[in-house]
Image (cartoon, helix red, strand yellow):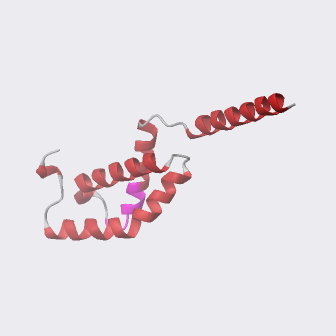
């Protein structure tokens, strides 16, 4: 990424900081709600904020949260994380392991 991609004007920088402060916690909770772990959520939120940084000038004021949610959802999809499948597989593995442990105890 070169420096021209990053918002460097004082107004854009001020707006970016304001948007990040107002939406960071919400966005992270939203991404965690999709079923990804903490580290993956950090990566997705960071990527969404980087996209916002590059496109801040075209994002309508007041629509930044919607833009960030869309970016986060796209990043989550691109990362290949299929929440329901992963969650189902994890639960299945836990149930299978629990069943084996019961067999070993008996």
Q: State the predominant SS element of the stretch in magenta.
A: helix
The picture places residue 17, in percent across and down from the top left corner, at: 27, 68
In this rendering, the answer to whether 74 lies above or below 89 is below
Task: Tell me if residue 71 can be seen.
Answer: no
Q: Position of residue 90 (x, y in %)?
A: 63, 36
Q: Nearer the viewer, residue 106 or 68?
A: 106
Residue 53 found in image quarter: bottom left
Left/right placement of residue 51 relative to residue 7 reads right
Q: Is residue 56 magenta?
A: no
**In-image side of 50 versus 105 (left or right):** left
Q: In percent of the image, x 17 and y 50: which residue is there? A: 5
The segment highlighted magenta reads 61-68
Residue 96, relative to residue 48: is it above or below? Answer: above
Using the rendered view, name the quadrant where residue 57 is placed.
Answer: bottom left
Residue 44 at x, y percent in the picture: 40, 48
Query: Is 104 in front, or is 42?
Result: 104
Whether residue 60 is visible to the viewer of this picture, yes or no, is yes
């Amino acid at each position: 990424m070169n420096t021209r991609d990053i918002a460097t004007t004082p107004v854009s920088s001020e707006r970016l900081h304001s948007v990040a402060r107002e939406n960071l916690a919400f966005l992270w909770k939203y991404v965690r709600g999709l079923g990804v772990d903490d580290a993956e959520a950090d990566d997705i939120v960071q990527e969404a904020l980087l996209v916002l940084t590059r496109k801040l000038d075209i994002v309508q004021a007041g629509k930044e949260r919607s833009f960030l949610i869309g970016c986060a959802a796209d990043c989550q999809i691109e990362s290949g994380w299929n929440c329901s499948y992963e969650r189902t597989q994890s639960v299945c593995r836990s149930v299978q392991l629990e069943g084996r442990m019961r067999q070993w105890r008996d």
